[in-house]
Amino acid sequence: MALVGNPNCGKTTLFNQLTGSSQSVGNWPGVTVERKEGMVRGEAVTVVDLPGIYSLSPYTDEEIVARDFILNQRPDVIVNIVDVTNLERNLYLTTQLFLLGRPIVVALNMMDVLEKKGEHIGCKVLQEKLGVPIAPISASKGLGIRRLMDCVHRVAGTGSPNKLEIFTGPVQTALESIERSISSNCAKGDIPPSFAAVKLLEGDPPMERTLGLRRDQLSRIHHWSEEVKTQWGMDCEMAVADQRYRMLCSLCRQVITKRPVVGIPLSERIDRVVTNPYLAFPLFLLVMFAVFGITFGPVGSWMQDTAASWIGAFTKQVQVLLGQWGASSWSIGLLCDGILAGIGSVVSFFPQILLLFFLLSLLEDSGYMARAAFIMDGPLRKIGLTGRAFVPMLMGFGCTVPAALSTRTLDNARDRRTVLWILPFLSCSARMPVYLLFASAFFQRGRVLLIFFLYFLGLLVAILSALLLKKTVKDEQESPFMMEMPPYHLPTLRGIGIHLWDKIKDFAVRAGTILLGATVIIWFLKSFTPALSFTNDSSQSILATIGGILAPFLAPLGFGDWRSAVALLTGLMAKESVVGTLGVLYGATGGSGNSLLLALRSAYTPLSALSFLVFVLLYLPCVAAFSAMTREMRSLKWTLAAAIYQLGMAWTVSFAVYQTGMLLGLG
Ligand code: GDP
Ligand code: MG
């Protein structure tokens, strides 16, 4: 038997209940989708946990895997797990599974949650309407499993007696005609004709290929779909989805009885304001501006100043102590000028990053982020994306790596590729220390504005790039917006604690590995000449030689100094390293924050600093992000193209900023 259902409906929980410990985990061939298989405890039944899917369209790997498994491996029974707290959306998949003509049992999961909410579901009526056995269960509590297995044994080997009538009118007529015309192809390919007919009407190239349709058949299908379009006023895929939802909506109304609610629920009342067509967008901007204002305004800079002075004092102490113990001058240099100066300059910005994350997780936990995605659907559609792309994009402001991984939630390859392409332009939090460092050195008064400008510039470049991609790469299907709106609730301390703790852990690991390694290497390279003798004059060092090769390319952008080139180079390991490296290269002994700022002020003008920041914003992502992107794009060619594009974009925009500034006499 195979477990099929939406993501998060409880498949894996049920799977674990059924199998206990007898399970094996692997990957489906060729894709990064997990495959789990096991034996039901005490029975000779194999059970497969199929990937979570919303539909059987061939857009995502998950959908293809699930659909091929059911069609080709022909499980004896499909157990369709339905989350009763979200009945309508979950049954949407059920209506598609019905067409596959396999024996099917519907398991109504999360019954315990439904009861808690005081709602009731008429299982008898639902079973009557669907025509297949229904078993109410609670997978996590292990309730109803016995009865579910009884149903499974009962339907195994029978036909598929479901009797749901979904389609009417022109859609129904078109489907019947298509079914007739392709019946021999279906028999040859052993594919259920009713399923094939719906898929062909919706437009499903893989299905056309599998069936090996002749040209005249294809043109007839095209004719019918045009017919539906003119009569129904929307394209066939929409028409089919529309009919399904209409039917399910009325079905759900019949089987679910809710506890009578007094007045309008609070969530809904809030939503009337928050997603109001006129208020939504200004409100969204206001919220975002508030987040920035708090993080980078007085509160944030106070946190940073405090942290920086503590670190400075700590470094001094260490230096004095080491001197008293009689440590050698090079070991003091390594520890204070190398490690503490490098990591310390990054760590001092960390409280501020945490503050940003604290505010963002407040928004997420309260349920506002889901509304923001909804609000952004319109604007995102204009650049060829959907509202669902908002979530990966928002994560991109935190870190590109999880953002790249989360693009898997997008329906089609084009959306995924576009989002991956533009993600690196969204300013990840690792770039923030660089902005903050230069803001304190050059733009003390306009820091909020400067940082808002950089984030905005990144977003603008991302949008233009998405548009460019939309224009140049051929269009595939657009997928409709579907997303859950969780009810609002007060953020819990626990939920936010988890977010922040993850961030702290992540940062500690980076500081302990990549940043530590980078600062040690940089210190070594700056302290030795190419002939490997110790030097105090870093312009004679190995590092100066390396940086000197790259510097001429950066000169037209206003920062042709070898130190800038080296800082950018180490930034490829992790963006915070740019600050760490500048700390090592410019920071005077003692590592106090002020000496670094003074050194920067003599090395950059405000204009070249701005140009440098623009370059840091737009140039290549760090190696971790790069490898995540390669993995998710599934094409090295695309990733390399993206990298070259980003580098070109960074150079061009920085060039424009610097040269325009020079012409205006701001140098
Ligand atoms: P999958 O994505 O379909 O594999 O879903 P999972 O098995 O990972 O379950 C998603 C979440 O739902 C988990 O947090 C489970 O603990 C929870 N869950 C699953 N079944 C039930 C249930 O019957 N009742 C409740 N309250 N939670 C459940
Ligand atoms: Mg699962």
Image: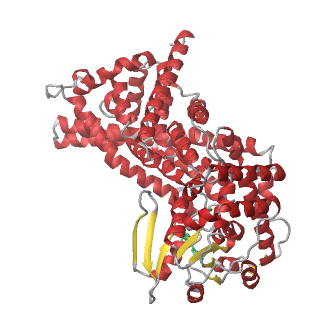
User: Is 206 drawn above or below residue 624 in the view shown?
Assistant: below
Residue 456, x across and y down, in percent = 60, 33
| Residue 488 seen in render | no
Colour option used:
secondary structure
Q: What residue is drawn where x is 53% and y is 18%?
A: 656
Farthest right residue in view: 263
Q: What residue is drawn where x is 53% and y is 43%?
A: 417
**Hey, which quadrant is residue 496 in on the image?**
bottom right
Q: Is residue 586 left or right of residue 601?
A: left
Front position in the image: 42 or 588: 42
User: Is 369 drawn above or below residue 285 in the view shown?
Assistant: below
Residue 498, x across and y down, in percent = 51, 60
Q: What residue is drawn where x is 55% and y is 84%?
A: 142
Residue 312, x across and y down, in percent = 37, 38
Residue 239, x across and y down, in percent = 76, 56
Q: Quadrant of ligand 1?
A: bottom right
Front position in the image: 189 or 557: 189
User: Is 580 drawn above or below residue 561 in the view shown?
Assistant: below
**Hey, which quadrant is residue 325 in on the image?**
top left
